[in-house]
Image (spheres, grey):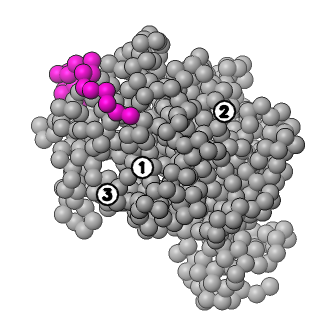
Amino acid sequence: MSQSVDVDTQQNILNAQTLRGRPPHSRLVPYRNVRHLLDNRAMESPDKVFLIHYDKDGNRDELTYAAFNARVNQTANLLLALGVQRGDRVSTIAYNHTDTVITYFACWKIGAMVAPQNVAEDDQRIAYILRNSEAVIALVRSEYLERAEQIIHGTEEGLGVSNIRQIIQVGGEPDAAYPHYQSLLERHSTSLDANDDTTLDDESLLVYTSGTTGPPKGVVLTQYNMLVDAYGISSWQGITGNQRMMAVLPIHHVNGTIVTLVTPMLVGASTVLNRAYSSSHFWERIAKEKVNVVSVVPTLLQFSCEFADEQALKGESIFGTDLDREDLSHFRHLICGAGTLAVQLARRFENQFGFPILHGYGLSETTCYSCFLPIDLSWEQHQHWMQDYGYPSIGCPISPNEMAIFDPTGSGQELPAGERGEICIRGHNVMKYYYQRPDSNRETFKFSWFRSGDEGFYQEDAQGRRFFFITGRIKELINRGGVKFSPFDIEEVLLEIPGIKVGLAVAFENDYYGEEVGAYVVLEDNATLNAEAILDYCRERMTFEKSPKVVIFGDEIPVTTTGKYQRLKLRDRFSAWKTTQFRK
């Protein structure tokens, strides 16, 4: 493997990548590599549309499988001409765009690894990731050229990336200072003559965790990780080649990449790629493009509900102007994960729009999704698992992996149904390792499962299927005097209060109990709630110990680009109460 993994940890990782006795080299997909898959698709369905793209102004373009493959081959030839070799890292500083997708597949065709950057991060963090990834070139959208130059060649503390040999401009008018991707592309053949020696074990994606403390960890995924997780997603969701998916999430993250790029490619389907989510265009594009499935995060469900409320106030369709339910007859369901989904929000969305949410769960370290609610549940069963346990169920494990709940102390003891512990995963979609992080690899795989760091439990149905639930990040649990509370429990109560748009439970430092419970609240427009009313409501429904002691109002909440709330970034807002002893 690398210096990231000692011999014992290497064996533990192999065990964690083994599915019920089936090692990862016993493949679940029939392709030699991504190149084999894409070439097959272009040969079998050359005129079928693979990728439809909408830019920020609503301009639309599309590529068939044959045309997409030709552009990928040209880009692969360009990368080879720039000196990119098998095993090299190629960084992208970009956004959702046809060119970005083509770059990904071109890298995979020649066995290179994509290290996509999240432009929402600060410059120092991007510089750290570029250095840590050891990327050799950076393909940069024209809008970000000046910033990329500062990050890569800057002299301020934390900036400077000596391993980047070249910046390639993508889009915009050619700048004499940088090679221009579109101009260079014209010089290269639409056929790829390079040796097809990549394998499913070649590293393909290097994505960095969005943790709030310490340096980000690079998650190394292989071509097999991507394809086998796409296989699990497509088979569970019933996604076939005659269907169409839509991407509204950023493709620098595994959700956007695996669910809405690799999965449709695997089954020969089509995908609609949006520059970003837009409430006013969401249902319109689903209707226009005959989309069957779309992948979202909870914050987008919230935005959709707010848009529907605004439409209703104007006496217009909740789906948008001139749209009704019949225009969406082809639409099946939404995939939702990556963030905290509250029961209240799930109920509100499903009641408002009438479409089911296929709630699921996964991590970058397990490629993307590891479980979903079953697709064959009746509406009554679906509502049972979404509402009756205090948390929406994240469902049952998909075919490439298994899941269990273990003692959260890391002892390796598996827990029975109903007991809370750490969610752990084992199977073919488990990552190769954390890049250059031997300490993290040892701890994460210490008992031959991948340890998620998330707290949860499971319940069984009449068929003996395990339905899992997530109750919070173990590190975000509020430890008040040795008694631990899940922020999710408290937030469900906060969201019951009329006028609260978002309410987060935050553990803040306290001299008397180590940590105390705070509430950070964003109110709905025109709401007149005060802190006293919120505290009184919570204390009527929870013990004093579990209830918030302080309420802070704000307008914004820190989230990752995939919609996960970053509670730890709110701790400092409560520092004034560090020395306060709260009494009943």
Q: Quadrant of residue 217?
A: bottom left
Closer to the camera in the image, 115 or 397: 397
Task: From the viewer's perspective, tell me whether residue 302 is left or right of residue 560.
Answer: right
Please tell me whether residue 182 belongs to the stretch shown in magenta: yes
Q: Secondary structure at mark 1?
A: strand
- Residue type at the position of mark 3: Asn
Main secondary structure type of the part rendered in magenta: loop
Q: Residue 358's spot in the image, x, y percent?
A: 69, 38
Mark 1 closeness class: few <14, some 14–19, many ≥20 residues within 10 Å: many
- Residue type at the position of mark 1: Val
Mark nearer the N terminus (1 vs 3)? 3
Vertical comparison of 147 with 68: above or below: below
Q: Which residue is mark 1?
A: 220
User: How far is the residue under mark 2 from the one under mark 3?
Assistant: 35 Å
Q: Residue at x 20, y 22 (%)?
A: 188
Mark nearer the N terminus (2 vs 3)? 3
Q: Which residue is mark 2?
A: 236
Q: Secondary structure at mark 2?
A: helix
Closer to the camera in the image, 400 or 247: 400
Q: Residue at x 84, y 40 (%)?
A: 463
Q: Which residue is mark 3?
A: 132
Q: Quadrant of residue 87?
A: top left
Q: Residue 525's spot in the image, x, y percent?
A: 65, 54
